[in-house]
Image (cartoon, rainbow, N blue to C red):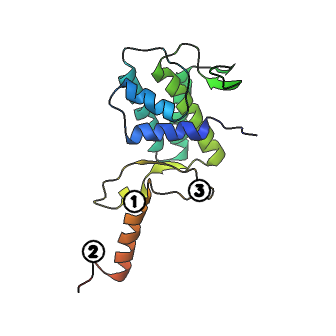
Amino acid sequence: MQLNPYGEYAVLLAASLANDFPSDRMGILARVREFGMTMDFTPGQQDHLLVRRVIEGWVAVVDAPSREERAALLNAQMAAAAAYPRLTDHNGEGWHLHYRDENQTLAHVLRAVISVGTALHLTTRGMTRLGRCAAGTTPGDPCSAVVVDVTRNGRQQYCSVRCANRAAVRRHRARSGSTSSGRAG
């Protein structure tokens, strides 16, 4: 039985948008479809700008310095979504739950889905399972990607294997006292 259908995919969608925001509404729609949202959205004149604001608000949750502040920000976002959960049956998917009112714009739907999904993710997996790539904590490392920890052990720190490897090389060099990238030969 799956009790949290919105948590993981909604948070991963938000991270994807935060880490690489599309240049237009069609790009946002393509990303939303890639993450499994099949419903139609009422077009809004400022969809691109308003979705960007939703993601900026979500990133404030990611960057909150404490669990309490994270919860307060997320509670405010869920209150602003002002959508009620409802059962729906569309696109041959069978009956399922939506966290949105009918005929809402893309930004309104994403605010509701992402905020509720993030709340479900944090309460079921842990309030610390969302953050920034650990590689970026090293001075001079440019990575500031959002990391959504969906691992079983709750220890995901890096946004990619590339960042994890770069950090491992730095740790190895620090232990060995080496500053060069190769051997003399």
Q: Work out which residue is located at the far right of the displayed protein and give it.
A: 1
> Element under label 1?
helix
Q: Where residue 70 sits in the image (x, y, percent)? A: 52, 41
Question: What's the mark number on residue 154?
Answer: 3
Mark 2, residue position: 181
Q: Quadrant of residue 19?
A: top left
- The residue under label 2 is which amino acid type? Ser
**Residue pictured at 30% horizontal, 80% vertical:** 178
Question: What's the mark number on residue 162?
Answer: 1
> Element under label 2?
loop
| First along the sequence among labels 2 and 1 | 1
Q: Is residue 32 left or right of residue 166?
A: right
CA–CA distance in space, label 2 to label 3: 32 Å
Is disc 3 surrounded by few (<14), some (14 to 19) or many (20+) residues within 10 Å? Answer: few
- The residue under label 1 is which amino acid type? Arg
Q: Quadrant of the C terminus?
A: bottom left
CA–CA distance in space, label 2 to label 1: 16 Å
> Element under label 3?
loop
Is disc 2 surrounded by few (<14), some (14 to 19) or many (20+) residues within 10 Å? Answer: few
Q: Is residue 168 left or right of residue 88?
A: left
Is disc 1 surrounded by few (<14), some (14 to 19) or many (20+) residues within 10 Å? Answer: few
**Residue pictured at 34% horizontal, 61% vertical:** 138
| First along the sequence among labels 2 and 3 | 3
Q: Work out which residue is located at the far left of the displayed protein and give it.
A: 185
